[in-house]
């Protein structure tokens, strides 16, 4: 892998950092990108090159890709990992925030993909790895905008996979379950801020607790599991189109296909503790 080059977004922590380290360990030249470069300086000790990149800023993304091509002459792997979870009742979430969720989780990933595809087509090789979520296949209360972005990225990945196949390019979707990262805490805080004080408060506090409660955290998988799966996908001669991995991913996706919509709704209400919270509050 000495001559192969990988770009990983959201590399300042969690899945992104683990993926960058894993690919570097396999011999890739790795560029780790994030908005806050100050959180990535420690990666340089491992030989990872860092880039300041905001996936909502086209000029920032263009500059990053130009730097990689100028320095390394190619891009073999793009890991679209940057993203966050914006939770709150549909009634409560401001449209500005809804658009921001799509800008980061969908449009940023797709725009960066557009920027690397000409180079990959010229090479007649490359792998696009889109980090979606088991949330791209299922739904949970108060997560409409987040799930919407993940459903969208799944669909875009499927369409693009067929489009770029003649050019020797693979598109792979990774669908993590519960992972020990900052994501859950940020999503829970956002949820409480958005819907924790109105008519959806009982649901919001129950859902937030299900995200960051001790019982949930204990069951979460390590980001390294996702990094290992990314490595498996990008080094495979013929990678799978999807990898559902991490706590709860495979069984929850399986149950979504098995149950009716209303039966799955009830399962999610029970699993998140919302059914008890709503009953207790009388709402």
Image (cartoon, grey):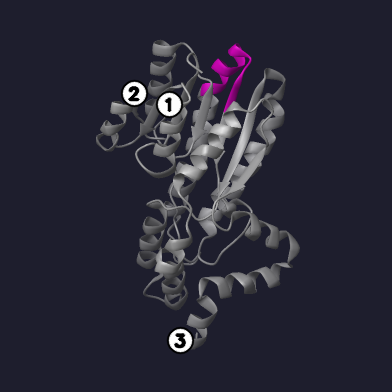
Q: Which SS class for mark 2?
A: loop
Majority secondary structure of magenta residues: helix
Is residue 264 shown above or below 63? below
Residue placed under numbered mark 3 in the picture: 281
Q: Does 117 appear in magenta?
A: yes
Alpha-carbon neighbours of circle 3 within 10 Å: few (<14), some, or many (≥20)?
A: few
Q: Position of residue 70 (x, y in %)?
A: 40, 11
Is residue 222 shown above or below 142? above
Q: Position of residue 231 (x, y in %)?
A: 54, 32
Q: Residue at x 38, y 21 (%)?
A: 63
Residue placed under numbered mark 1 in the picture: 24
Is residue 161 shown above or below 268? above
Residue placed under numbered mark 2 in the picture: 47
Q: Which SS class for mark 1?
A: helix
Alpha-carbon neighbours of circle 2 within 10 Å: few (<14), some, or many (≥20)?
A: some
The stretch of residues the image draws in magenta is 116-127
Q: Residue at x 67, y 19 (%)?
A: 168
Taking depth in this image into account, of 13 and 69 the one nearest to the observer is 13
Label count reads 3
Using residue 236 as the reference point, say whether residue 90 is left or right of it: left
Residue 213 in view: no
Residue 141 in view: yes
CA–CA distance in space, label 3 to label 1: 51 Å
Q: Residue at x 45, y 32 (%)?
A: 22
Q: Position of residue 42 (x, y in %)?
A: 27, 33
CA–CA distance in space, label 1 to label 2: 8 Å
Residue 59 position by quadrant: top left
Q: Looking at the image, is mark 3 or mark 2 earlier in the sequence? A: 2
Q: Are marks 1 and 2 in contact (CB under 8 Å)?
A: yes
């Amino acid at each position: 892998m000495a001559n192969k080059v990988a770009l990983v977004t959201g590399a300042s922590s969690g899945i992104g950092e683990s993926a960058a380290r894993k690919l570097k360990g396999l011999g890739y030249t790795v560029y780790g990108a994030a908005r806050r470069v100050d959180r990535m300086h420690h990666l340089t000790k491992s030989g990872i090159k860092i880039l300041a990149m905001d996936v909502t800023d086209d000029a920032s993304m263009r500059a990053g890709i130009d730097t990689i091509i100028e320095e390394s002459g190619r891009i073999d792997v793009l890991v679209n990992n940057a993203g966050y979870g914006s939770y709150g009742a549909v009634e409560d979430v401001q449209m500005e925030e809804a658009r921001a969720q799509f800008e980061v989780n969908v449009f940023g990933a797709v725009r960066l993909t557009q920027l690397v595809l000409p180079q990959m087509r010229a090479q007649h090789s490359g792998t696009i790895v889109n980090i979606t979520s088991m949330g791209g296949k299922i739904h949970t209360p108060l997560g409409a905008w987040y799930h919407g972005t993940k459903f969208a990225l799944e669909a875009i990945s499927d369409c693009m996979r067929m489009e770029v196949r003649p050019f020797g390019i693979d598109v792979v979707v990774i669908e993590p379950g519960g992972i020990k990262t900052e994501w859950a805490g940020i999503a829970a805080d956002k949820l409480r801020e958005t819907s924790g004080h109105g008519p959806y408060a009982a649901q919001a506090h129950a859902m937030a607790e299900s995200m960051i409660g001790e019982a949930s955290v204990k069951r979460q998988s390590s980001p390294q599991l996702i990094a290992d799966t990314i490595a498996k996908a990008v080094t495979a001669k013929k990678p799978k189109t999807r990898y559902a991995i991490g706590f709860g991913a495979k069984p929850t996706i399986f149950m979504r296909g098995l149950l009716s919509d209303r039966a799955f709704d009830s399962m999610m209400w029970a699993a998140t503790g919302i059914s008890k919270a709503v009953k207790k509050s009388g709402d």
